[in-house]
Amino acid sequence: MVITRRQIELETFLLISIVVVGSLYFAIQKNNHQPQFSFASGISPVSAPAEIISPKITVAQQISPDGEKKVIMKVTENSDNTKTHDLSTADENGANEKFVFTKILDSSKSMSIPFNTWSPDDKYFFIQENAGENKSIFVFKATGESLFPIGSKFPVRQSSNSPPNSNCLPLIISYSILFKVLYSALQKGR
């Protein structure tokens, strides 16, 4: 194989051209500070997720005298400065919960479950609404089936000594300053 001078010149020229083009490419890349591909420009900024504020829920309950039922009041503080009072009854272990009543009150009013909320026979209970000096009571069946208005009379036994079918009725009195629930010996129908 015979190499001619022309071939050597041509190969040398090609080799020098490749070296010059490569050098120019690296020199241009070094002086150009901007990257060719910018991944950050296509990414939108991520904002932190909005904080979710859960309403504050308070639970109060009172167990019946026989220990088998309980009244449950869940009070939810709303964002509009009101409170929602949800009333329910359930078995002592929390099973068979039945919704009874709900009421929304402004911040100047409240509702509570008195310690003596249950009737002696566990068929009725009452709750108290407090509006400043004014107190009101609401009477309910423990089953949640119906609501009795303030001042209602309903059948209960006066004491454990009274026979199951005694004619005793509770007398509910609502005062402007305080309330009382009196189990009196009134005859039915009087």
Image (cartoon, rainbow, N blue to C red):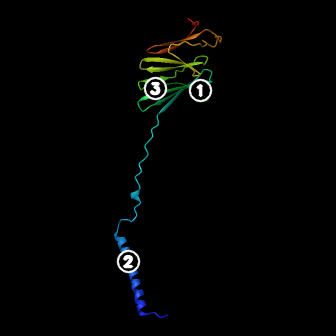
Q: Where does the image place residue 31, in percent across and percent down from the top left?
A: 34, 70
Name the element at disc 3.
strand
In the image, residue 102 sits, relative to residue 1, either above or below, namely: above
Task: Give, as a three-letter code, the residue at label 3.
Answer: Ile
Please tell me in which quadrant of the rendered image residue 164 appears.
top right
C-alpha distance separating marks 3 and 2: 81 Å
Residue found 49% across the figure and 20% down from its top: 128
C-alpha distance separating marks 1 and 3: 22 Å
In the image, residue 84 sits, relative to residue 1, either above or below, namely: above
- In this view, the residue in front, 177 or 43, is 43
Q: Is the C-beta separation of discs 1 and 2 under 8 Å?
A: no
Please name which of the two marks, 1 or 3, marks the residue nearer to the observer.
3
Pointer 1 residue: 90
Pointer 2 residue: 23
In the image, residue 120 sits, relative to residue 70, either above or below, namely: above
Task: Give, as a three-letter code, the residue at label 2.
Answer: Ser
Q: Where does the image place residue 140, in percent across and percent down from the top left?
A: 55, 19
Question: Tag 2 or tag 3, which sits nearer the N-term?
Answer: 2
Pointer 3 residue: 104
Q: Is residue 105 visible?
A: yes
Residue found 44% across the figure and 45% down from its top: 49
